[in-house]
């Protein structure tokens, strides 16, 4: 087959005279291209361009441009998968079909290594196949080292390098490569994403917005199991901690099913809070619990603390203000068959503490003896404001006889302070009206963004807070407490979540 090759532009670039040449497919082009490391050729049949071929003109230095998506896709806003077709001419060895596996094993160091591209291709001759080679390692038979030459000799393989034209398509490129080729040069390709069941949730930046539908489609195509991609269109600033979203690609079905720490949860992702990065933290708290313990989950969401706690045979009293969270929490308790162990409320956190939590606590104290090993935990995961609910514990049991089993609170908070542990302890003390010095542990949950940490402070509610309030701290909600936790008391476990 003969093709016309227009080399005008390229030749100008590499200092050869502009002209058009006739070449035979497979002809070694190195002699025509001088020192240029890649040769890009527009193949013209009759009067229209049929394809763009890129091949190394000689053994190039290791880089990835050879496999990059075509430059012509830059600026594309509507995905056209055909535009990603690109021809590569790769070095290849002709090997007997029945020896192909053994030879491939012996020559794996020089075989083509590009995920998604086949290394062994048919020749149209049953007796032989081609092993495609890494063009960064082999360009001619001289590129083989002595041991590789020995392998070729042992298998009676002709060291002649064949040229194989391979077409890369949209399917062969990774999402990052596609987006890097499409989006303006030098700008961030994507800002990461989280996966919630079949949904990918993105938070695109301004410069990415013109490409948002293309980005959505690419992310969906390249992530098996994803059938919907959404972009956050507002900050999480509403009371229920969910956010507005726009569907960029795929179905408009936001009913997600996720598994966290081996427990299944279902919920409408557009209406409730769910953060796939909190699995480790949920597990950390659940690991502190033992069967028979009592757990009050003040801001329970769809149940990632409450349900595993109930599964562990704790008695759970859970609450959430969002009617949708309440509904899905009830649903998840049923799905996980623990609805008998969980009592669920749909109240504001303060009302919950002053009402159901207090009533239940009083009941627990009536049945617990002082020698009982049962622990009582109060989980408060609303990091933007949970500490502000701590004053609800002041004098909560003022009419009761003091009992020595004090509830342990796990209260979450964000901090932008450069001393986040001191910051959260101070704010907790202010709202409690008591010092926690020496009586709390503080855990760094995760880094939310530069300069913003999510922390968890755990402490037993001081008896003077529950029964009398602490006179020394009375009315000191605006004042910093005198003594602070040392930084070395933070239990920092910031592993990936
Ligand atoms: C950060 S989410 C935590 C949910 C769950 N505990 C988790 O770890 O994924 C906070 C939850 O508190 C609920 N919430 C917000 N304000 C509340 C309030 N004043 N009283 C009770 N729940 C509230 C929200 O609906 C949301 O489900």
Image (spheres, rainbow, N blue to C red):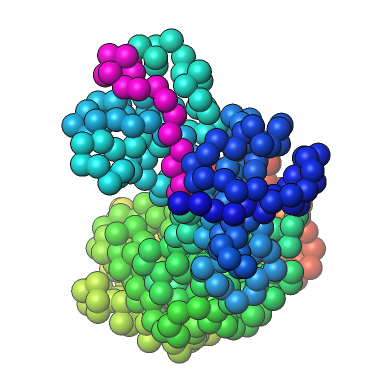
> Eyeballing the image, is 34 above or below 275?
above
Residue range in magenta is 151-166
**In front of the other: 192 or 296:** 192
Q: Position of residue 131 (x, y in %)?
A: 35, 35
379 or 89, nearer to the observer = 89
Question: Which residue is pictured at 43% across the width and 34% down the height?
Answer: 162
Is 418 situated left or right of 166 in this image? Answer: right
Quarter of the rendering containing residue 86:
bottom right
Residue 69, visible in the rendered structure: no
Q: Position of residue 70 (x, y in %)?
A: 61, 57
Question: Is 163 colored magenta in this rendering?
Answer: yes
Residue 487 sits inside the magenta stretch: no
Q: Is residue 465 above or below residue 113?
A: below
Q: Residue at x 59, y 29 (%)?
A: 59
Residue at left offset 39%, top offset 16% = 148
The image quarter containing residue 75 is: bottom right
Percent of width and height locating residue 422: 71, 51
Residue sitting nearer the eye, 294 or 318: 318
Left or right of residue 359: residue 88: right
């Amino acid at each position: 087959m003969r093709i016309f090759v227009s080399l005008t532009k390229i030749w100008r670039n590499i200092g050869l005279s502009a002209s058009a040449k006739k070449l035979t497919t497979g002809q070694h082009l190195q002699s025509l291209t001088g020192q240029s490391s890649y040769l890009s050729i527009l193949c013209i049949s009759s009067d229209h361009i049929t394809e763009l071929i890129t091949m190394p003109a000689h053994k190039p230095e290791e880089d990835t441009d050879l496999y990059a998506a075509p430059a012509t896709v830059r600026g594309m806003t509507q995905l056209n998968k055909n535009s990603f077709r690109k021809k590569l001419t790769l070095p290849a060895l002709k090997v007997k079909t029945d020896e192909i596996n053994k030879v491939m094993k012996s020559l794996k160091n020089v075989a083509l290594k590009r995920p998604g591209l086949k290394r062994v291709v048919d020749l149209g001759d049953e007796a032989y196949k081609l092993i495609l080679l890494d063009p960064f390692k082999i360009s001619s038979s001289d590129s083989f080292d002595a041991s590789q030459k020995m392998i070729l000799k042992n298998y009676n393989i002709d060291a002649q390098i064949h040229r194989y034209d391979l077409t890369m398509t949209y399917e062969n490129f990774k999402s990052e490569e596609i987006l890097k080729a499409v989006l303006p040069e030098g700008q961030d390709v994507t800002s990461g994403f989280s996966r919630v069941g079949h949904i990918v949730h993105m938070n695109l930046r301004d410069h990415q917005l013109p490409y948002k539908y293309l980005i959505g489609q690419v992310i969906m195509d390249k992530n098996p199991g994803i059938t919907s991609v959404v972009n956050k269109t507002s900050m999480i600033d509403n009371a229920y901690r969910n956010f507005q979203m726009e569907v960029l690609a795929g179905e408009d079905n936001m009913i997600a099913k996720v598994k966290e720490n081996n427990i299944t949860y279902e919920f409408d992702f557009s209406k409730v809070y769910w953060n796939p990065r909190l699995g480790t933290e949920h597990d950390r708290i659940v690991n502190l619990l033992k069967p028979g313990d009592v757990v009050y989950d003040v801001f329970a969401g769809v149940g990632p603390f409450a349900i595993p706690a109930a599964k562990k045979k704790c008695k759970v009293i859970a609450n959430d203000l969002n009617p949708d969270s309440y509904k899905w929490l009830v649903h998840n308790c049923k799905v996980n068959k623990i609805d008998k162990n969980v009592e669920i409320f749909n109240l504001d956190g303060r009302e919950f503490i002053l009402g159901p939590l207090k009533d239940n606590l009083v009941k627990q104290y009536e049945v617990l003896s002082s020698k009982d090993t049962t622990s009582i935990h109060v989980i408060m995961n609303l990091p933007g404001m949970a500490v502000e609910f701590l004053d609800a514990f002041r004098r909560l049991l003022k009419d009761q006889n003091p009992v020595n089993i004090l509830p342990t609170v796990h209260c979450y908070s964000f901090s932008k302070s450069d001393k986040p542990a001191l910051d959260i302890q101070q704010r907790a003390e202010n709202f409690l009206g008591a010092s926690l010095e020496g009586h709390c542990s503080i855990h760094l949950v995760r880094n939310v963004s530069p300069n913003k940490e999510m922390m968890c402070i755990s402490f037993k509610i001081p008896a003077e807070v529950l029964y009398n309030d602490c006179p020394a701290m009375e009315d000191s909600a605006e004042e910093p407490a005198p003594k602070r936790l040392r930084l070395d008391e933070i239990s920092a476990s910031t592993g990936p979540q």
